[in-house]
Image (cartoon, rainbow, N blue to C red):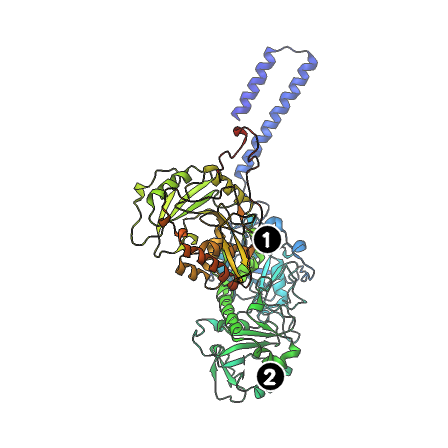
Amino acid sequence: MTKIKNLMSFVTQSRAISHPNPREHILNCLTYGLLVIVALCAGFLLWDLSNSPRDGFFHGKRDSHKLILDLEHIQEVSLNPEGEQRARNVNCTFWDCLNIYKCEHDRLKVYIYPLQEFVDERTDKVATTLSSEYFQILEAVLKSRYYTSNPNEACLFLPSLDLLNQNVFDKHLAGAALASLDFWDRGANHIIFNMLPGGAPSYNTVLDVNTDNAIIFGGGFDSWSYRQGFDVAIPVWSPRLVRQHAHATAQRKFLLIVAQLNILPRFVRNLRELAMAHSEQLLLLGACEGFDLAMRCPLSQHHKSLEYPRLLSRGKFCLLTRSLRLGQPDLVEIMSQHCIPVIAVDNYVMPFEDVIDWSLASVRIRESELHSVVQKLKTISSVKVVEMQKQVQWLFSKYFKDLKTVTLTALEVLESRIFPLRARSSRQWNAIDTNARSTFNPLFLPSLAPKSQGFTAVILTYDRVESLFLLIQKLAVVPSLQSILVIWNNQKKSPPHLSTFPSISKPLKIRQTKENKLSNRFYPYPEIETEAILTIDDDIIMLTTDELDFGYEVWREFPDHIVGFPSRIHVWDNVTMRWHYESEWTNQISMVLTGAAFHHKYWSHMYTHAMPGDIKDWVDEHMNCEDIAMNFLVANITNNPPIKVTPRKKFKCPECTNTEMLSADLNHMRERSACIDRFSKIYGRMPLRTVEFRADPVLFRDNFPDKLKRYNDIGSL
């Protein structure tokens, strides 16, 4: 208001000083009047905004505090069962029924409605009752990275309404309760968990509740009710998995075990015939007297009871066939005992089948072929059976071991649809390799900025301190260098103290290895924070700053290639009928030696954790061929040749004597030819690719002033 008074004072003074003509005087008055009105409006607007509640674009009640799942203080909400409800939209797709504009660019956020008890205002009937299983689901989301207490920033909304088991709630009241939710909006961006849909006599494969455009996380979908790319198929949970673990050393006596209850009668007849024909290989079980779900009895011996599901650990394969409901808790019970599921249910949508490759961990047959199931299983080799058992064990521990894991997996599946660039690849979802997240082709890395630019120089050294120090000084002035990691491969002698190393402006770290292995240069050390790694020997001191910087720039264009300086070729010897290692200069190259080469840190993970056969052990035992092994590995996966940069071909250390250089030994060279021949047999082919070009700077050898060239000193031959 003080500013407005000052403005009025200024207007008064202006009028007193100037004496314009009447027309100009009127214009000035109008202008000043408009300025005063605008200033007053702006002041009142700012005052109003500073004192008004900030509810965002959601109007009405909102609690921005973190939800507390307090079962003793659940709010009761009166419900009008005659309120408007809309049936499930069977035509929903990801693009039609999901508003992705509510989702931020970095991660999925889920808002959980407060715990409420919806009661029919006329009959006082409760719509649903909260089960311990659904409480665990809510708790899993609440404690996860997905949860948000602010509906304004939420992408998805999770009702606290328990709809897991359709048999225990009123369908009409449940639909009315959903429609009454604050942010329902015809179910858009809402997720509903349901494991047991349908009821007698039809037993529909999807929840019989009016869910409109909501996404169903369902446990009983068939190919007709499942909305591909929109719904998420989840397993039916089994409470019998609590504190139940498979015996790792259990003897698997039977080829096939059938312990499922409520199998349709026509399939029971087929299974009885199979059990009689293959009594030593097929164990057929049913309910015991008293119908104890934790026990099973052979159909011919009701007095002999077996503990369930532990008995499944005695079989290699366990059958899951059609029952009243498609989705059965038997699947997770089978997997918990590391038994391979045999799925004989037509049109059944397997849990998380959008991301899990079930062909690696199960056998699927048509219902009409159930009579031949034993013959089909006999054709599977013992090696394949072991692989599938390991995959079943891994999948269960990764995605099915408890309700929390199932819940978070379902959300990640949905997140991968909304943010496909951040999604895991199929290999990451299904690879047993624990390093799968960091070991897949960098061509298909998510489009995210790298953690750090530049490269890390990894220097493998043993005892050449003077040469090492000189190399460090040369590397330190390379503009693209990020840090230096010295791998001290000598266990008999400690490395020099860090204070004795050259003083440089870049981070320098030293690691002393436990064993003298050439493969130590490729270990994915945690100190390596860059994607680019320069592996370099301590005697490679002849490379110039421009050569190293240019090599890094070439690698940035081809991050899945090995990019480096010393090159070699492999040739076929028609006399010996073997592959031969050639170090002479030729018109072709097929290998770039890692004594001075750039590679993506992905390849270090692959070399350490996924090298085929016994190649890595052989290299460590013979102290040779680690660079050839790396070239084979990269070429086998990418089918691309390496890239040589700059014309330099001589890499001999002038300060080193020949006896110091491992590669000077003639036996060393013979072994390298043997390496190529051995590795090609392990791979079952020759993966190395030859190429007839190298990469040089654009103005290399052009008659241009040096000031116009980015790389002046790229060295000589």
Q: Picture coordinates of residue 285 (x, y %)? A: 53, 83
Kind of residue indicated by mark 2: Leu
Q: Quadrant of residue 119?
A: bottom right
Q: Is residue 545 above or below residue 683?
A: above
Q: Is residue 95 above or below residue 244?
A: above
Image quarter for residue 11? top right
Q: Secondary structure at mark 1?
A: helix
The spot of residue 392 in percent (x, y) is: 51, 69
Give the labeled residue for mark 2.
271
Count neighbours of disc 2 (C-alpha within 10 A) and say few if under 14, some if 14 to 19, many if 20 or more.
Answer: some
Seen from the viewer's position, the closer of residues 639 and 41 is: 639
> What amino acid is found at the position of numbered circle 1 in the picture?
Pro
For residue 665, side relative to residue 271 (left or right) = left
Residue located farthest toward the front when viewing the structure as drawn: 575
* Rendered location of residue 622, percent (x, y): 40, 59
| Along the line of sight, the residue nearer the viewer: 85 or 595 | 595
Label 1, label 2: how many angstroms apart (C-alpha)? 44 Å
Q: Residue, x 31% and y 43% (percent of image)?
A: 498
Dot 1, how many residues are within 10 Å of its Cα: few (below 14), some (14-19), or many (20+)? few
Query: Which is more toward the observer, 245 or 571?
Result: 571
User: Count the marks: how many?
Assistant: 2
- Reading the image, the residue beneath label 1 is 420
The answer to whether the residue labelled 1 contacts the one labelled 2, judged by CB atoms less than 8 Å apart, is no
- Sequence order check, earlier mark of 1 and 2: 2
Look at the image and tell me whether residue 69 can be seen. no
Judging from the image, what secondary structure is the residue with disc 2 in?
helix
- Please state the horizontal and vertical placement of residue 334, each as a whole percent of the image: 52, 74
* Residue at image location 44% in from the left, 72% down from the top: 245
